[in-house]
Amino acid sequence: QVSTPGELLGIAVRIAREAAETARRMRVDGVTGVRTKSTDTDVVTAADRAVERQVVAALAAERPQDGVLGEEYGNSTSAASGAVRWILDPIDGTVNYLYGLPQYAVSLAAEVDGVVVAGVVRNAATGDEWTATLGGGAWRDGRRLSGSVRTTLDQSLVATGFGYDAARRAHQAAVVAGLITRVRDIRRFGAASLDLSLAAEGQVDAYFEKGLNPWDHAAGGLVAAEAGLRVSGLDGAAPGADMVLAAPPALFGPLHDVLTELDAAGGP
Ligand code: IPD
């Protein structure tokens, strides 16, 4: 079953909208089933699990041969080359969800042979939605996105996030302490997929974070890249657990160099 990026995006958007509605409704009914995962600060709720099950079931019904990598239930990979693997964060921004802050999203991307070709990020609290296909641009509500036009780092608003591991947090705090005097300001909204989408839209100038998982950045990373941002790790590495940096071309170099310098202090 060969599908174009546009067809995959159509499926992703439809399923993400249903999933976002489930998350929103379960929030109105009251958060239940709160547990911790990797650390005491890493939470999961019944809604994270229910939304993931719903998306996995919808994909299985429609595209049984595809693989799925989801945050809560892990990996089911289709062996065939050219096969589609869906990458899902059922609720990105679970801590915001827990507290009722309107910054949590369903993030769903389609990857073919390791390349993300379509992605949707839907803010489940507000209904805001960002989409992209490889080579087809990044979009919000029929408007094509092109990122920030800012050219100087000291005038830039930079978003970031923190992982849940204590040693990593300490390192991230040191990086932020070094960065805050070199930029306009720093934002921490609490959902990586939305941070990347805001960078695509130019509502922040750039975004970086260390320690992300694929489900945090697969869809949002494509949205940012298709908006014209450079999205990568440090020193030309692919975006991944070591670093995801998304910035317009003029800001990428300066921010990359500052982060390389601050990151050199080491840390997980
Ligand atoms: C988290 C959010 C947060 C980021 C963390 C992620 P989750 O995802 O994206 O902004 O800083 O690194 O783990 O746990 O809410 O799906």
Image: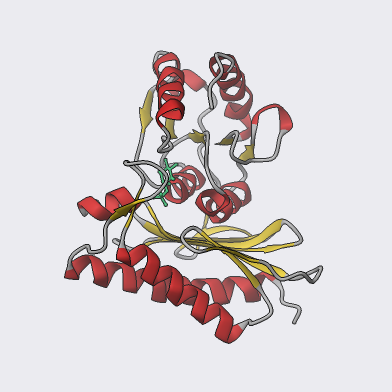
Image coords of residue 236 (percent x, y):
73, 32
- Front-most of residues 48 and 20: 48
Instruction: Kindly tell me whether residue 134 is visible in this rendering.
Output: no
- Front-most of residues 100 and 128: 100
Residue most extreme to the bottom: 61
Image coords of residue 234 (percent x, y):
65, 29
Query: With respect to residue 36, does 256 lie above or below?
Result: above
Instruction: Give me the residue at 50% from left, 50% from top.
Output: 216
Instruction: Give me the residue at 44% from left, 26% from top.
Output: 167
Residue most extreme to the right: 81
Instruction: Kindly tell me whether residue 72 is visible in this rendering.
Output: yes
Task: Report whether 249 appears left or right of 81.
Answer: left
Task: Report whether 161 appears left or right of 11.
Answer: left
Instruction: Name the quarter where the N terminus is drawn.
Output: bottom right
Instruction: Give me the residue at 44% from left, 44% from top.
Output: 195
Query: With respect to residue 196, does 160 lie above or below?
Result: above
Query: With respect to residue 242, does 253 lie above or below?
Result: above
The colour scheme is secondary structure
Image coords of residue 268 (percent x, y):
54, 27
Instruction: Give me the residue at 55% from left, 56% from top.
Output: 219
For residue 231, which quarter of the picture?
top right
Image coords of residue 24 (percent x, y):
28, 68
Task: Report whether 69 appears left or right of 115.
Answer: left
Q: How many marks?
A: 0
For residue 157, which quarter of the picture?
top left
